[in-house]
Image (spheres, rainbow, N blue to C red):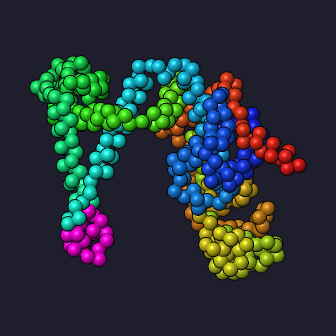
Amino acid sequence: MKVFNRISSIALLVIFALLTAPGIAAGKASEVLVTVGKTPVTAADLETAVRSSPFAVQFNSLEEQEQAVLRGDLLQRLVALRLLYLEAKARGLDATPEFRKEMEEYRTAQLYRFYIQKLREQLRLPEDELEALKAEYPGQPDALAAAKAARLAEEFRGLRLLSLQLLRDRQHVRFFEDRIVEGITPETVLMEGDDVAVRYQDLVKEGDFPKMPDPEWIKERLYQRTELLLFAQAAAQENVDIEARMESYAQERLPALLTEQMEQQWVPDEKALRDYFDATPDLAKIPERWHVGQLVTSSYAQAAALEKRIREGESLFALAGRYSIDQYGRAHNGDMGWLKEGEGNPEFELRLKNMADGEVSDIIKTSKGYHLVTVLERRPGKMRRFSEMKDKVRQAIINDQLAAYLKVLNEKYPVDWKILADSSAQGAKSE
Protein backbone atom coordinates (compact mmCIF):
# COMPACT_ATOMS: atom_id res chain seq x y z
CA MET A 1 0.00 0.00 0.00
CA LYS A 2 1.68 3.18 -1.16
CA VAL A 3 0.68 6.32 0.74
CA PHE A 4 3.58 8.65 0.02
CA ASN A 5 1.53 10.50 -2.56
CA ARG A 6 2.85 13.90 -1.45
CA ILE A 7 6.45 12.93 -0.90
CA SER A 8 9.16 13.13 -3.54
CA SER A 9 11.41 10.23 -4.39
CA ILE A 10 14.31 12.18 -2.89
CA ALA A 11 12.42 12.48 0.39
CA LEU A 12 11.79 8.76 0.30
CA LEU A 13 15.51 8.13 0.00
CA VAL A 14 16.05 10.40 3.00
CA ILE A 15 13.50 8.37 4.97
CA PHE A 16 15.18 5.11 4.06
CA ALA A 17 18.55 6.56 5.02
CA LEU A 18 17.22 7.77 8.35
CA LEU A 19 15.73 4.36 9.02
CA THR A 20 19.24 2.91 9.12
CA ALA A 21 20.24 5.33 11.86
CA PRO A 22 21.35 3.59 15.07
CA GLY A 23 18.66 5.26 17.14
CA ILE A 24 15.86 3.95 14.94
CA ALA A 25 17.38 0.52 14.41
CA ALA A 26 18.21 0.07 18.08
CA GLY A 27 14.83 1.39 19.11
CA LYS A 28 14.21 4.79 20.69
CA ALA A 29 10.81 3.35 21.39
CA SER A 30 8.96 6.58 22.08
CA GLU A 31 10.33 8.51 19.09
CA VAL A 32 7.48 9.59 16.80
CA LEU A 33 8.30 8.89 13.16
CA VAL A 34 5.04 10.11 11.65
CA THR A 35 1.61 11.26 12.77
CA VAL A 36 -1.60 10.34 10.95
CA GLY A 37 -4.26 12.83 11.93
CA LYS A 38 -3.41 13.05 15.62
CA THR A 39 -2.31 9.43 15.87
CA PRO A 40 1.44 8.85 16.26
CA VAL A 41 3.46 6.04 14.72
CA THR A 42 6.51 5.47 16.90
CA ALA A 43 9.81 3.67 16.48
CA ALA A 44 8.39 0.98 18.78
CA ASP A 45 5.44 0.48 16.41
CA LEU A 46 7.84 0.09 13.51
CA GLU A 47 9.99 -2.44 15.38
CA THR A 48 6.88 -4.45 16.25
CA ALA A 49 5.97 -4.49 12.57
CA VAL A 50 9.49 -5.65 11.68
CA ARG A 51 9.32 -8.50 14.21
CA SER A 52 5.89 -9.53 12.93
CA SER A 53 6.85 -9.45 9.25
CA PRO A 54 7.58 -12.57 7.18
CA PHE A 55 11.18 -11.29 6.92
CA ALA A 56 11.75 -11.19 10.68
CA VAL A 57 13.90 -14.33 10.78
CA GLN A 58 16.38 -13.18 8.12
CA PHE A 59 16.11 -9.43 8.84
CA ASN A 60 19.43 -9.15 10.69
CA SER A 61 21.22 -10.96 7.88
CA LEU A 62 20.09 -8.38 5.30
CA GLU A 63 22.35 -5.62 4.07
CA GLU A 64 21.87 -2.23 5.78
CA GLN A 65 20.24 -0.72 2.68
CA GLU A 66 17.89 -3.70 2.37
CA GLN A 67 16.90 -3.29 6.03
CA ALA A 68 16.18 0.39 5.43
CA VAL A 69 14.00 -0.34 2.39
CA LEU A 70 12.08 -2.97 4.36
CA ARG A 71 11.58 -0.58 7.27
CA GLY A 72 10.41 2.12 4.86
CA ASP A 73 7.89 -0.24 3.25
CA LEU A 74 6.58 -1.35 6.65
CA LEU A 75 6.31 2.28 7.77
CA GLN A 76 4.18 3.01 4.69
CA ARG A 77 1.93 0.09 5.59
CA LEU A 78 1.57 1.32 9.16
CA VAL A 79 0.53 4.75 7.87
CA ALA A 80 -2.02 3.15 5.53
CA LEU A 81 -3.46 1.09 8.40
CA ARG A 82 -3.73 4.22 10.57
CA LEU A 83 -5.60 6.05 7.80
CA LEU A 84 -8.04 3.17 7.42
CA TYR A 85 -8.41 2.86 11.19
CA LEU A 86 -9.31 6.54 11.60
CA GLU A 87 -11.86 6.35 8.80
CA ALA A 88 -13.38 3.18 10.23
CA LYS A 89 -13.79 4.93 13.59
CA ALA A 90 -15.28 7.98 11.88
CA ARG A 91 -17.83 5.74 10.19
CA GLY A 92 -18.75 4.16 13.53
CA LEU A 93 -17.66 0.65 12.60
CA ASP A 94 -16.34 0.17 16.13
CA ALA A 95 -19.86 0.67 17.48
CA THR A 96 -21.58 -1.98 15.36
CA PRO A 97 -22.97 -5.07 17.13
CA GLU A 98 -20.88 -7.31 14.87
CA PHE A 99 -17.62 -5.63 15.81
CA ARG A 100 -18.45 -5.51 19.51
CA LYS A 101 -19.25 -9.22 19.47
CA GLU A 102 -15.99 -9.93 17.68
CA MET A 103 -14.06 -7.88 20.23
CA GLU A 104 -15.75 -9.74 23.07
CA GLU A 105 -14.80 -13.06 21.49
CA TYR A 106 -11.21 -11.84 21.19
CA ARG A 107 -11.22 -10.74 24.83
CA THR A 108 -12.49 -14.16 25.89
CA ALA A 109 -9.82 -15.91 23.84
CA GLN A 110 -7.04 -13.76 25.33
CA LEU A 111 -8.25 -14.38 28.89
CA TYR A 112 -8.44 -18.10 28.15
CA ARG A 113 -4.84 -18.08 26.89
CA PHE A 114 -3.74 -16.30 30.07
CA TYR A 115 -5.40 -18.93 32.27
CA ILE A 116 -3.95 -21.83 30.28
CA GLN A 117 -0.49 -20.27 30.51
CA LYS A 118 -0.93 -19.86 34.26
CA LEU A 119 -1.76 -23.57 34.57
CA ARG A 120 1.33 -24.48 32.56
CA GLU A 121 3.56 -22.33 34.77
CA GLN A 122 2.44 -24.31 37.80
CA LEU A 123 3.85 -27.54 36.42
CA ARG A 124 7.13 -28.85 37.77
CA LEU A 125 8.40 -32.41 37.66
CA PRO A 126 9.18 -33.74 41.13
CA GLU A 127 12.92 -34.05 41.69
CA ASP A 128 12.74 -37.84 42.07
CA GLU A 129 10.93 -38.20 38.72
CA LEU A 130 13.44 -35.92 37.03
CA GLU A 131 16.35 -37.93 38.39
CA ALA A 132 14.67 -41.16 37.27
CA LEU A 133 14.34 -39.80 33.71
CA LYS A 134 17.98 -38.73 33.71
CA ALA A 135 18.98 -42.23 34.75
CA GLU A 136 16.78 -43.71 32.00
CA TYR A 137 18.29 -41.52 29.26
CA PRO A 138 21.97 -41.02 30.19
CA GLY A 139 23.91 -39.00 27.61
CA GLN A 140 20.75 -38.57 25.47
CA PRO A 141 19.70 -34.90 25.88
CA ASP A 142 17.13 -34.98 23.05
CA ALA A 143 15.45 -38.13 24.36
CA LEU A 144 15.47 -36.72 27.90
CA ALA A 145 13.86 -33.46 26.72
CA ALA A 146 11.16 -35.41 24.83
CA ALA A 147 10.45 -37.59 27.88
CA LYS A 148 10.20 -34.53 30.15
CA ALA A 149 7.83 -32.85 27.68
CA ALA A 150 5.64 -35.96 27.52
CA ARG A 151 5.41 -36.16 31.32
CA LEU A 152 4.60 -32.45 31.62
CA ALA A 153 1.95 -32.77 28.92
CA GLU A 154 0.38 -35.64 30.86
CA GLU A 155 0.48 -33.62 34.08
CA PHE A 156 -1.03 -30.63 32.28
CA ARG A 157 -3.98 -32.67 30.99
CA GLY A 158 -4.74 -33.77 34.53
CA LEU A 159 -4.39 -30.28 35.99
CA ARG A 160 -6.55 -28.79 33.24
CA LEU A 161 -9.37 -31.31 33.77
CA LEU A 162 -9.24 -30.84 37.54
CA SER A 163 -9.38 -27.04 37.19
CA LEU A 164 -12.27 -27.30 34.76
CA GLN A 165 -14.24 -29.53 37.09
CA LEU A 166 -13.67 -27.17 40.02
CA LEU A 167 -14.91 -24.22 37.96
CA ARG A 168 -17.95 -26.17 36.78
CA ASP A 169 -18.83 -27.03 40.35
CA ARG A 170 -18.31 -23.45 41.49
CA GLN A 171 -20.65 -22.19 38.71
CA HIS A 172 -23.16 -25.05 39.22
CA VAL A 173 -22.90 -25.81 35.52
CA ARG A 174 -25.62 -27.97 33.95
CA PHE A 175 -25.66 -29.38 30.40
CA PHE A 176 -28.81 -29.98 28.36
CA GLU A 177 -27.63 -32.42 25.70
CA ASP A 178 -31.15 -33.80 25.28
CA ARG A 179 -32.09 -30.50 23.59
CA ILE A 180 -29.75 -31.23 20.64
CA VAL A 181 -32.47 -32.52 18.34
CA GLU A 182 -33.97 -31.57 14.99
CA GLY A 183 -35.88 -28.33 15.28
CA ILE A 184 -33.44 -26.78 17.74
CA THR A 185 -33.54 -22.96 17.66
CA PRO A 186 -30.65 -20.47 17.88
CA GLU A 187 -31.73 -19.37 21.37
CA THR A 188 -31.85 -22.90 22.80
CA VAL A 189 -29.73 -23.03 25.97
CA LEU A 190 -27.40 -26.05 25.99
CA MET A 191 -25.31 -25.14 29.08
CA GLU A 192 -26.16 -22.95 32.00
CA GLY A 193 -24.38 -21.91 35.19
CA ASP A 194 -24.81 -19.21 37.79
CA ASP A 195 -23.62 -16.45 35.41
CA VAL A 196 -22.55 -18.30 32.29
CA ALA A 197 -24.52 -19.90 29.47
CA VAL A 198 -24.05 -21.40 26.00
CA ARG A 199 -26.77 -21.28 23.37
CA TYR A 200 -27.02 -23.17 20.11
CA GLN A 201 -26.22 -19.96 18.19
CA ASP A 202 -22.90 -19.76 20.05
CA LEU A 203 -21.87 -23.08 18.50
CA VAL A 204 -23.48 -23.10 15.06
CA LYS A 205 -23.75 -19.97 12.97
CA GLU A 206 -27.13 -19.62 11.30
CA GLY A 207 -26.90 -20.36 7.59
CA ASP A 208 -23.64 -22.34 7.78
CA PHE A 209 -25.46 -25.66 7.60
CA PRO A 210 -28.58 -26.59 5.60
CA LYS A 211 -29.66 -28.83 8.49
CA MET A 212 -28.53 -29.55 12.03
CA PRO A 213 -24.96 -30.93 12.12
CA ASP A 214 -24.07 -34.23 13.75
CA PRO A 215 -25.11 -34.12 17.46
CA GLU A 216 -21.76 -35.51 18.62
CA TRP A 217 -19.97 -32.69 16.81
CA ILE A 218 -22.25 -30.16 18.51
CA LYS A 219 -21.58 -31.74 21.92
CA GLU A 220 -17.83 -31.53 21.35
CA ARG A 221 -18.11 -27.84 20.52
CA LEU A 222 -20.38 -27.35 23.54
CA TYR A 223 -17.78 -28.71 25.96
CA GLN A 224 -14.99 -26.73 24.26
CA ARG A 225 -17.04 -23.53 24.53
CA THR A 226 -17.78 -24.22 28.18
CA GLU A 227 -14.09 -24.61 28.97
CA LEU A 228 -13.29 -21.42 27.07
CA LEU A 229 -15.87 -19.38 29.00
CA LEU A 230 -15.05 -20.78 32.44
CA PHE A 231 -11.29 -20.35 32.11
CA ALA A 232 -11.71 -16.84 30.67
CA GLN A 233 -14.07 -15.92 33.49
CA ALA A 234 -11.56 -17.18 36.07
CA ALA A 235 -8.80 -15.10 34.46
CA ALA A 236 -11.04 -11.99 34.43
CA GLN A 237 -11.65 -12.39 38.15
CA GLU A 238 -7.90 -12.01 38.66
CA ASN A 239 -8.08 -8.56 37.01
CA VAL A 240 -5.81 -9.50 34.12
CA ASP A 241 -4.98 -6.39 32.08
CA ILE A 242 -5.33 -7.11 28.36
CA GLU A 243 -6.44 -3.64 27.24
CA ALA A 244 -3.25 -3.04 25.24
CA ARG A 245 -3.89 -6.27 23.32
CA MET A 246 -7.51 -5.29 22.76
CA GLU A 247 -6.52 -1.91 21.32
CA SER A 248 -3.87 -3.51 19.13
CA TYR A 249 -6.42 -5.98 17.78
CA ALA A 250 -8.93 -3.20 17.10
CA GLN A 251 -6.27 -1.26 15.17
CA GLU A 252 -5.77 -4.32 12.97
CA ARG A 253 -9.39 -5.41 12.63
CA LEU A 254 -11.14 -2.09 11.97
CA PRO A 255 -9.05 -1.36 8.82
CA ALA A 256 -9.89 -4.85 7.59
CA LEU A 257 -13.62 -4.31 8.17
CA LEU A 258 -13.54 -0.98 6.34
CA THR A 259 -11.65 -2.56 3.44
CA GLU A 260 -14.17 -5.40 3.27
CA GLN A 261 -16.98 -2.84 3.03
CA MET A 262 -15.21 -0.87 0.32
CA GLU A 263 -14.43 -4.02 -1.67
CA GLN A 264 -18.15 -4.62 -2.08
CA GLN A 265 -18.39 -1.22 -3.76
CA TRP A 266 -15.23 -1.67 -5.83
CA VAL A 267 -16.14 -5.15 -7.07
CA PRO A 268 -19.95 -5.32 -6.95
CA ASP A 269 -20.40 -8.15 -9.46
CA GLU A 270 -18.73 -10.32 -12.09
CA LYS A 271 -19.31 -7.66 -14.76
CA ALA A 272 -16.83 -5.39 -12.95
CA LEU A 273 -14.28 -8.21 -13.08
CA ARG A 274 -14.90 -8.84 -16.79
CA ASP A 275 -14.67 -5.13 -17.68
CA TYR A 276 -11.34 -4.77 -15.86
CA PHE A 277 -10.00 -7.95 -17.44
CA ASP A 278 -10.89 -6.72 -20.94
CA ALA A 279 -9.31 -3.32 -20.26
CA THR A 280 -6.00 -4.74 -18.93
CA PRO A 281 -4.95 -7.58 -21.25
CA ASP A 282 -1.41 -7.67 -19.82
CA LEU A 283 -2.89 -9.04 -16.62
CA ALA A 284 -3.67 -12.31 -18.39
CA LYS A 285 -0.25 -12.64 -19.96
CA ILE A 286 2.16 -15.31 -18.75
CA PRO A 287 5.55 -14.06 -19.99
CA GLU A 288 8.00 -16.26 -21.85
CA ARG A 289 10.92 -17.56 -19.76
CA TRP A 290 14.39 -18.64 -20.82
CA HIS A 291 17.00 -20.72 -19.03
CA VAL A 292 20.08 -18.74 -20.02
CA GLY A 293 23.78 -19.46 -20.29
CA GLN A 294 26.03 -16.40 -20.52
CA LEU A 295 29.62 -15.24 -20.80
CA VAL A 296 30.43 -11.52 -20.29
CA THR A 297 33.67 -9.74 -21.10
CA SER A 298 34.85 -6.16 -20.65
CA SER A 299 36.12 -5.74 -24.24
CA TYR A 300 34.88 -6.55 -27.70
CA ALA A 301 38.22 -8.04 -28.65
CA GLN A 302 38.13 -10.60 -25.83
CA ALA A 303 34.48 -11.43 -26.61
CA ALA A 304 35.39 -12.00 -30.27
CA ALA A 305 38.31 -14.26 -29.32
CA LEU A 306 36.13 -16.33 -26.99
CA GLU A 307 33.33 -16.47 -29.57
CA LYS A 308 35.82 -17.97 -32.04
CA ARG A 309 36.85 -20.62 -29.53
CA ILE A 310 33.19 -21.51 -28.87
CA ARG A 311 32.50 -21.80 -32.62
CA GLU A 312 35.49 -24.15 -32.83
CA GLY A 313 34.02 -26.46 -30.22
CA GLU A 314 34.89 -25.20 -26.72
CA SER A 315 32.16 -24.92 -24.08
CA LEU A 316 30.66 -21.51 -23.39
CA PHE A 317 30.09 -22.67 -19.81
CA ALA A 318 33.68 -23.75 -19.22
CA LEU A 319 34.95 -20.46 -20.64
CA ALA A 320 32.43 -18.46 -18.55
CA GLY A 321 33.75 -20.14 -15.42
CA ARG A 322 37.25 -18.87 -16.30
CA TYR A 323 36.73 -15.52 -18.03
CA SER A 324 33.28 -14.04 -17.34
CA ILE A 325 33.37 -10.69 -15.54
CA ASP A 326 29.87 -11.33 -14.18
CA GLN A 327 30.58 -12.63 -10.67
CA TYR A 328 27.43 -14.76 -10.42
CA GLY A 329 27.93 -16.19 -13.91
CA ARG A 330 31.58 -16.96 -13.25
CA ALA A 331 30.74 -18.70 -9.95
CA HIS A 332 28.06 -20.79 -11.71
CA ASN A 333 30.03 -21.52 -14.90
CA GLY A 334 27.76 -19.31 -16.98
CA ASP A 335 24.45 -20.82 -15.83
CA MET A 336 22.32 -17.74 -15.13
CA GLY A 337 19.11 -19.59 -14.28
CA TRP A 338 15.71 -18.45 -15.56
CA LEU A 339 15.06 -15.00 -17.02
CA LYS A 340 11.47 -13.79 -17.32
CA GLU A 341 10.35 -11.68 -20.27
CA GLY A 342 10.26 -8.02 -19.27
CA GLU A 343 12.92 -8.32 -16.56
CA GLY A 344 16.00 -7.83 -18.74
CA ASN A 345 17.44 -5.59 -21.45
CA PRO A 346 14.84 -5.37 -24.29
CA GLU A 347 17.45 -5.92 -27.03
CA PHE A 348 18.87 -8.83 -25.08
CA GLU A 349 15.40 -10.42 -24.77
CA LEU A 350 14.69 -9.90 -28.49
CA ARG A 351 17.78 -11.97 -29.29
CA LEU A 352 16.65 -14.72 -26.91
CA LYS A 353 13.23 -14.84 -28.55
CA ASN A 354 14.72 -15.33 -32.00
CA MET A 355 17.42 -17.86 -31.09
CA ALA A 356 17.07 -21.63 -31.30
CA ASP A 357 17.72 -23.62 -28.13
CA GLY A 358 21.43 -24.42 -27.89
CA GLU A 359 22.43 -21.74 -30.36
CA VAL A 360 25.14 -19.30 -29.26
CA SER A 361 24.46 -15.64 -30.06
CA ASP A 362 26.77 -13.21 -31.74
CA ILE A 363 28.24 -10.53 -29.48
CA ILE A 364 25.64 -8.38 -27.68
CA LYS A 365 26.80 -5.06 -26.21
CA THR A 366 25.09 -3.71 -23.09
CA SER A 367 26.09 -1.33 -20.31
CA LYS A 368 27.47 -4.32 -18.41
CA GLY A 369 29.85 -5.46 -21.13
CA TYR A 370 29.97 -7.75 -24.16
CA HIS A 371 27.77 -10.83 -23.93
CA LEU A 372 27.66 -14.25 -25.56
CA VAL A 373 24.47 -16.06 -24.64
CA THR A 374 22.67 -19.31 -25.26
CA VAL A 375 19.20 -20.62 -24.41
CA LEU A 376 19.27 -23.99 -22.66
CA GLU A 377 15.48 -24.36 -22.59
CA ARG A 378 12.44 -22.11 -22.71
CA ARG A 379 8.91 -21.94 -21.41
CA PRO A 380 6.62 -20.23 -23.94
CA GLY A 381 4.33 -17.44 -22.82
CA LYS A 382 0.56 -17.64 -23.11
CA MET A 383 -2.64 -15.74 -22.36
CA ARG A 384 -4.86 -17.02 -19.55
CA ARG A 385 -8.65 -17.16 -19.83
CA PHE A 386 -10.94 -14.98 -17.73
CA SER A 387 -12.24 -18.03 -15.86
CA GLU A 388 -8.69 -18.70 -14.62
CA MET A 389 -8.09 -15.10 -13.62
CA LYS A 390 -11.06 -14.05 -11.49
CA ASP A 391 -9.22 -14.01 -8.16
CA LYS A 392 -6.22 -12.18 -9.62
CA VAL A 393 -8.45 -9.65 -11.40
CA ARG A 394 -10.37 -9.03 -8.19
CA GLN A 395 -7.14 -8.39 -6.28
CA ALA A 396 -5.84 -6.09 -9.02
CA ILE A 397 -9.03 -3.98 -8.85
CA ILE A 398 -8.80 -3.81 -5.06
CA ASN A 399 -5.14 -2.76 -5.20
CA ASP A 400 -5.91 0.02 -7.68
CA GLN A 401 -8.95 1.27 -5.79
CA LEU A 402 -7.24 1.06 -2.40
CA ALA A 403 -4.32 3.18 -3.59
CA ALA A 404 -6.72 5.87 -4.79
CA TYR A 405 -8.80 5.60 -1.60
CA LEU A 406 -5.74 6.09 0.59
CA LYS A 407 -4.95 9.32 -1.26
CA VAL A 408 -8.45 10.55 -0.41
CA LEU A 409 -7.98 9.60 3.24
CA ASN A 410 -4.61 11.36 3.25
CA GLU A 411 -6.48 14.58 2.45
CA LYS A 412 -8.90 13.97 5.31
CA TYR A 413 -6.30 12.89 7.86
CA PRO A 414 -3.04 14.72 7.07
CA VAL A 415 0.16 12.70 7.37
CA ASP A 416 3.02 14.57 9.05
CA TRP A 417 6.42 12.93 8.50
CA LYS A 418 8.24 13.86 11.71
CA ILE A 419 11.24 11.86 10.61
CA LEU A 420 11.74 14.26 7.67
CA ALA A 421 11.24 17.35 9.83
CA ASP A 422 13.75 16.05 12.38
CA SER A 423 16.33 15.38 9.66
CA SER A 424 15.92 18.93 8.29
CA ALA A 425 16.34 20.42 11.75
CA GLN A 426 19.46 18.37 12.40
CA GLY A 427 20.89 19.42 9.03
CA ALA A 428 20.28 23.11 9.75
CA LYS A 429 21.81 22.74 13.19
CA SER A 430 24.94 21.08 11.83
CA GLU A 431 25.41 23.94 9.34
Q: Write the start and end of the magenta stretch as one range.
A: 130-148
What residue is rendered at 31% in x and 71% in y? 141
Say if 54 sits above or below 296 in the image: above
What residue is rendered at 58% in x and 59% in y? 60
Q: Is residue 398 magenta?
A: no
Q: Is residue 41 visible?
A: yes
Say if 217 sits above or below 27 in the image: above
Question: Residue 168 vs residue 8: left or right?
Answer: left
The front one of 222 and 351 is: 222
Q: Dividing the picture into quarters, in which one does residue 397 lie?
A: top right
Question: Residue 241 vs residue 210: left or right?
Answer: right
Q: Is residue 142 magenta?
A: yes
Expressed as whole percent of the image width and height from the top left, the position of residue 52 reads 51, 47
Expressed as whole percent of the image width and height from the top left, the position of residue 364 reads 76, 65
Q: Dividing the picture into quarters, in which one does residue 179 lie?
A: top left
Q: Is residue 46 visible?
A: no
